[in-house]
Structure formats: structure tokens, C-alpha cells
Image: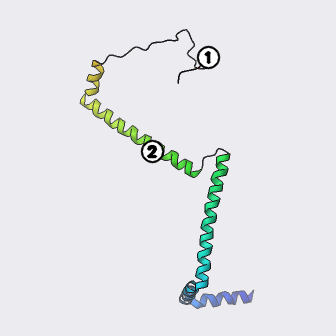
């Protein structure tokens, strides 16, 4: 126990300057830098494989992955932007009164009920045309 304490004390006394010098020497050594580069490259490749495998497993269980979530989020944001634009245009039309004028000029069409004898429940009315 006393040996470990003295080793720690020696390292502590060595100071930041000597440790920085040692780190620079180790990093500048070509063998160490090549090994570090190879380790980082392998780690990156492994992470890519793990990510693909996780996406595959999530797909098998029909669970959305992070990329699925991000795609859906982008679509929702696009729809939200379109709705905001429509709302702004509608507000402009209402403010100018153009919409009210158009509504008075154009009479509403009455819908025709072709299958009035059938139930309104889509499951009971048979196949639909949509």
C-alpha cells in the first residue's frame, strides 16, 4: 500500500509540465500514432455495423429507429409549415373580405346519396370505391 502511495506521489510531483511533454512524445511516436489511428478506424467501422444491425433488429420487430423518427419528424414539420402558410393565406382572405364575397357568389352543392338504402357503416355497406 505504501508503494502505491509513493508512486502516486511521484506522479503528482512530476507536475503537469512533464506529463504534457510525455504525452507529446508518445503521440509523436509513429508506431503509437499508427496504432491509435487503426483503433479509431476500427471503432468507427464497428459502430457503423452495430448501428445497421440495431436498425435491422428494430425493423424486424416493427419498432421505429432513430432514423425513422427523424424522417417522420421532418414530414410532420413540413405539414405543419404548410398548415401555417394556409392559415396565413386564409387570414388574409378573411381580412380583405374576398372569401366572404366568393362564398356568397358560389352556391353550395347538395350531395347526392346514391346508396341511401344502405347502412352508413362502411363495413356493412360492402366494398367501397376508394
x and y percentages locating residue 114 in the rendered image: 49, 12
Few, some or many residues within 10 Å of mark 2 (<14, 14–19, 20+) = few
Residue sitting at x 62%, y 63%? 47
Vertical comparison of 129 with 9: above or below: above
Q: Which residue is mark 2?
A: 77
Which circle marks residue 19 in the picture?
A: none
The secondary structure type at the circle numbered 2 is helix
Name the image quarter holding residue 4: bottom right
**Which of the two residues, 35 or 92, is positioned nearer the viewer here?**
35
Rendered position, 38 above or below 83? below
Mark in front: 1 vs 2: 1
Residue at image position (69%, 90%) is 6
**What secondary structure is found at the residue carrying circle 1?**
loop
The x, y position of residue 118, in whole percent, is 57, 11
Q: How is the image coloured?
A: rainbow
The numbered mark, 1 or 2, whose residue comes first in the sequence reads 2
Which residue, as the protein is rendered here, is positioned at the far top?
A: 117
Other-residue count near label 1 (Cα within 10 Å), few / some / many at <14 / 14–19 / ≥20: few
Please name the residue that numbered disc 1 is placed on: 124
When the figure is inspected, residue 80 is found, relative to residue 26, above or below; the finding is above
Confirm or deny contact between disc 1 and disc 2 (CB under 8 A). no
Who's the residue at 63% across and 46% down the image?
63
Amino acid at each position: 500500500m505504501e508503494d502505491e502511495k509513493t508512486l502516486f506521489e511521484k506522479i503528482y510531483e512530476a507536475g503537469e509540465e512533464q506529463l504534457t511533454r510525455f504525452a507529446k512524445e508518445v503521440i509523436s511516436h509513429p508506431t503509437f500514432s499508427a496504432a491509435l489511428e487503426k483503433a479509431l478506424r476500427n471503432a468507427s467501422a464497428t459502430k457503423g455495423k452495430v448501428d445497421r444491425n440495431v436498425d435491422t433488429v428494430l425493423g424486424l420487430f416493427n419498432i421505429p429507429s432513430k432514423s425513422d423518427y427523424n424522417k417522420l419528424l421532418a414530414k410532420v414539420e413540413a405539414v405543419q409549415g404548410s398548415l401555417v402558410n394556409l392559415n396565413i393565406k386564409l387570414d388574409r382572405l378573411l381580412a380583405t373580405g374576398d372569401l366572404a364575397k366568393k362564398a356568397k357568389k358560389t352556391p353550395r352543392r347538395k350531395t347526392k346519396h346514391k346508396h341511401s338504402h344502405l347502412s352508413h357503416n362502411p363495413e356493412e355497406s360492402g366494398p367501397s370505391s376508394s
